[in-house]
Image (cartoon, grey):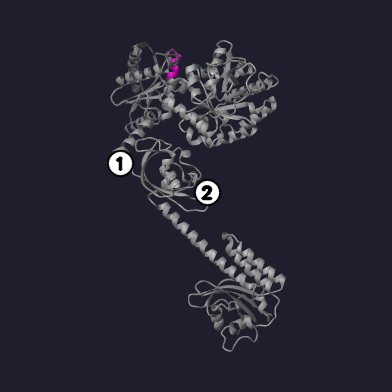
Amino acid sequence: MQPAEDLTAYGKLHASRAMAELLDITETLLRAPATGITRAIRLALARAATVCGADRALLCAAGPDGGLRTIHDWMRKGLSRRRMALIGGATDWAGDWAPILFAGRTVVLHPGAAAPGDRAAAPLAAAGLQTLVAVPIPDDAGRPGCLTLCWTGAARIAAEDLPPLRPLAAALLAALARREATRALADGRTLLRSILQTGTSAVLAFDGARRIVFANPEAAALLGSPAETLPGKTLDAIGCRLLTAEGAPIADADRPVDCVLANGQPMCGQHVVLACADGRHRILNVNATPVATTSAGGVQVVATLDDVTGQVSTDSALRSALAEAHQLAYFDPLTGYYNRRGIVEVLRDCLHGCGSGGTHLALLYIDIDGMRQVNGGRGHWMGDRLLEAVARRLDGLRLDGGDLGRISADEFVLTLAEPQPDAATAVKAAEAQAEAILAALREPFRLDGLTLEITVSIGLAAISAGTTVEALLKGGELAVMAAKAGGGNRACAYRPDMEQDMVGRVALTQDLREALRRNEFRIHFEPMVRLDATGLHIVGHEALIRWQHPTRGMVPPNAFIPFAEGSGFIRDIDLWVLRRAAAELARWTPDPARRHLTLSINISSASFLSPGFAQAVRDLLAETGADPRRIELEVTEGTLLTNLGAARTTMSELRTMGLSIALDDFGTGFSSLSYLRDLPVDVLKIDRSFLSALSEADANMTILEGIIGLARGLGVEMVAEGVETPAQFEWLRAKGCQTFQGYLFGRPQPAPQLALPPEILALGGLDAVAPAAGAGRHNHPPLANG
């Protein structure tokens, strides 16, 4: 036995080529990814043995008994594995030279070098090996391992051959340490995830942009969303809001996550009210702490949330917050009675009671006749006063146990709670109640010195087990339509065949098909105007379909579009409107007075969500030569909610072609804010119902201000529809709205309107131009004549 330092020059491992290859092996090993360390170690052993001409390579570590244990082993093909097992298979095979190795000195064994009695000589010879080199791998504990190379022949090893092996040995040790650390980290993560998944508290992890990085099952259940859909989204994006104990929205800077991000300090025991997207309100105890990380997109804050709603009996402020949140979610702020969501819950309870008791109830769907005329002739503030008075009068007629709610602008639902043995008897009871309501509401209303007289149309429907809430409301609405078709001021009970009998649906559908064949449809154009630094200008039109019926005259769309949608014929009508509008737009191109105008076209959900719609639009553009940049397609919130995935795909394809997407009737849906951020929308069109009910004392004013701010924040344009009075225009302009549409500027006409009347132009005085709210698409150069 002899240490390497005493050897004379026999070998050639220090030659430049071999040394370069050993250094390359070392560098490759050090750069190996964490997931491939084991493979990299094995490959390094094989390459090192090949470069050195060795027949076997072993990576060994000190065992707990003081001997060596083999961690990785490589041998040249053709060698006897059975014989080779004599080396590396036992912990004491290093024999008498192990102390030299543990002292940090390289060991070299070759013929004639082994001292008598050396225990390594026998297994070495038995394994058919003549030469062995063991390079120590130092560690902090002073019990090194070693990199061992073996030859079946008498290798010529020199002292100069050993230095290139030492960096490789050190790299192997580093690789082993990295592997152990990676495994320990993975085990730790598995343990942590198990703890988080089985804990009773909701746990959320956020990045620096307040996006969710991790949510355990408790958090997903609390937020009302599947856990796999939460990463990458903020609480706002999934429709969740944080409220104070008094029910007011918590300012961004005061939210727990924002405070921890700003201050870098933990926050403990903060009570907040969580308003979920599905209407639930829960009181939470929140603890949040910062997390040190070097990754910009990594976890920055971890928060635990405990639902303490059931503990609010000792905290009156929290009880008040929960009650107020419930009031906002289920009750109409104008009348104080149930809103649409509240009535839906009432009807669900009614259906449950009918199912368990085998009884039948009834609902009355009440629609005020001519409410638009009241708003237009007396003002919206008087319309609100009238709605409040109607609600009070209906409440006075409500029978014991019944519920009342205002489910839309001028529509109420009243339930009868007295159980009946069958549906026919329930409807009879509703008919008697309807007659009392009709008589009571015909009595004049005296409000602020004015006398108003109204009538109502009432739809009746039995509430029976096996029905759905949606079917009940639809049945009541169909019955109301039948009552209105009969002249109003009457009640009508729903029948299953009412949809067909009410308007002769089959005949109307045939007429619609013939109308397309006979070219009876017409396009009318309603102007859209924009306010800029030079005043008001017409910048585009909305294309509106009309039906020139041979016997009925000019039929408005609301008289036939619902039946076209129900019959499936709406897709043909949509394609006709698209083709005619695109062709008209192409004809405007050479005209200097029209070439800058855009066209906005309404598309039904049946067409927009159909698989071939985007391709049909592409074909129409090629056919007509219309500029897609001047076409805007309008869809409703209901269209998007029907199939959000299909809608997003279609919107992306259309925008790729150059078209713009407008969200029509914005504000009337239930989930606008939760999905709007993720959809490629260019324009928000505020539903005209907000303007029709706008007054200084109305919550609609606050809603409109919020929508205008939302449009500005999202960088999308906003169009206010239904502007009919200068007062509405002035209010909108003062709030930053710059694009308008409504009868104040022009009614739909067969030919596009090119100029505004002088009295309208005067409204756009230069001294009152406000900052833009989502300016963009309709910002075109003005016409020469204004």
Residue 23 % position (x, y): 66, 68
Measuring from the top left, give residue 17's x and y in whole percent.
72, 70
Q: Is residue 85 visible?
A: yes
Q: Is residue 734 found inside the magenta-colored segment of the image?
A: no
Q: Secondary structure at mark 2?
A: loop
Residue 162 percent across, percent down from the top left: 64, 76
Percent x, y of residue 530 = 57, 22
User: Residue at horizontal 69%, vertical 26%?
Assistant: 623
Callout 2 crowding tier (Cα within 10 Å): few <14, some 14–19, many ≥20: few
- Against 293, residue 347 (above or below) is above
The residue that disc 1 covers is 312
Magenta stretch? 480-487
Residue situated furthest bottom in the rendering: 116
Between 424 and 61, the one lying in front of the other is 61
| Quarter of the picture holding the C terminus | top right
Occupied quadrant, residue 45: bottom right
Question: What amino acid does circle 1 point to?
Answer: Val
Query: Of 769 and 502, which appears nearest the observer?
Result: 769
Outermost front residue: 767
Which residue in the protein does label 2 denote?
A: 297
Asked if residue 7 lies left or right of residue 313, the reply is right
Q: On the rendered structure, is 75 left or right of 339?
A: right
Q: Residue at x 54, y 78 (%)?
A: 102
Q: Crowding near pointer 1: few (<14 within 10 Å), some, many (20+)?
A: some
| Quadrant in the rendering for residue 645 | top right
| Mark 1 and mark 2 residues within 8 Å of each other at the beta carbon | no
In the rendered view, tell whether residue 541 sits above or below residue 774: above
Depicted 230 relative to depicted 682: above or below: below
